[in-house]
């Protein structure tokens, strides 16, 4: 009887110990959800915010400890975390498909918020203005995308449009789509932009050929090509600034 009682107590203790890793069992001051409500969202660390997204950890780790480990794997860089796929996140013990999807969705919302927060620049004065518009959209992508800014006579941006999506090393661009859109938006000038996932800022030979092809096509329609920017996560290359347009 005594031995059975001890075993039962031990089993009960182990269950409670595992359950203590649930956010609901933490001290109130340590609970990310409650901390957000009481102290505000700015009081939470990155790992605590991610802990809210995943809700719970595993048998060995709390949600915050698990979140810290996930962040450590990407050198505590939120941008790098945002590039992980659902499959990659599921490699962490305690992260199933649902939790991985929650993390991906949460970080994608943050990226879109950043994109929306870019103020509309009424007039393009230099290449840096273009970079500020397009960097939040294509700067940290893992694949190439080609976008065009359509401008009026005052260099005001009438519209920005994705023309094509490619892989890690390139994307195909149809000049007819570019200038059909230019005519649709009644644009008198365009600025080309695309990203290099590799981080390299040197234009490829195909980049140069495409730029000249679109420049010549625009001349016949009286639509001027003002610039072509290659954009990376932290920097850019301007054909116009380098006088190779």
Image (cartoon, helix red, strand yellow):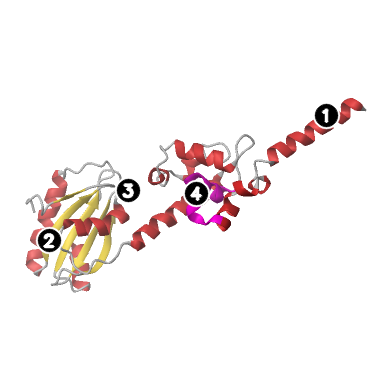
Q: In this rendering, is residue 6 above or below 216?
A: above
Q: Which residue is mark 1?
A: 7
Q: Which residue is mark 2?
A: 226
Nearest to N terminus: mark 3 or mark 2: 3
Q: Which residue is mark 4?
A: 103
Q: Which residues are magenta?
A: 39-55
Quarter of the image where one finds residue 59? top right
Q: Residue at x 14, y 67 (%)?
A: 189
Nearest to N terminus: mark 2 or mark 4: 4
**Disc marking residue 140:** 3
Nearest to N terminus: mark 1 or mark 2: 1
* Residue 173 seen by the camera: no
Nearest to N terminus: mark 1 or mark 3: 1
Disc 4 on helix, strand or loop? helix
Quarter of the image where one finds residue 119? bottom left
C-alpha separation, residue under disc 3 versus residue under disc 2 = 24 Å
Q: Main secondary structure of the magenta part?
A: helix
The mark tally for this picture is 4
């Amino acid at each position: 009887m005594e031995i059975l009682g001890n075993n039962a107590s031990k089993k009960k203790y182990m269950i409670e110990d595992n359950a203590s890793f649930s956010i609901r069992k933490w001290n109130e001051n340590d609970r990310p959800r409650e901390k957000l409500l009481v102290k505000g969202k700015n009081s939470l660390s990155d790992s605590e915010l991610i802990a809210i997204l995943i809700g719970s950890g595993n048998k060995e780790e709390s949600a915050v400890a698990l979140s810290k480990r996930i962040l450590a794997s990407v050198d505590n860089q939120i941008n790098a975390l945002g590039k992980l796929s659902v499959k990659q996140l599921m490699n962490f013990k305690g992260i199933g498909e649902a939790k991985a999807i929650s993390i991906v969705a949460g970080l994608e919302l943050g990226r879109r918020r950043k994109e929306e927060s870019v103020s509309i620049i009424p007039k393009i004065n230099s290449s840096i203005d273009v970079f500020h518009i397009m960097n939040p959209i294509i700067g940290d992508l893992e694949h190439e995308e080609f976008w065009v800014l359509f401008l009026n006579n005052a260099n005001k941006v009438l519209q920005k449009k994705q023309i094509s999506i490619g892989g890690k090393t390139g994307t195909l661009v149809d000049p007819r789509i570019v200038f059909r859109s230019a005519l649709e938006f009644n644009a008198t000038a365009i600025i080309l932009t695309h990203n290099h996932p590799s981080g390299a800022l040197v234009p490829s030979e195909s980049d140069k050929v495409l730029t000249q092809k679109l420049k010549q096509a625009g001349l016949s329609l009286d639509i001027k090509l003002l610039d072509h920017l290659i954009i990376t996560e932290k920097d850019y290359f301007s054909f116009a600034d380098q006088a190779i347009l």
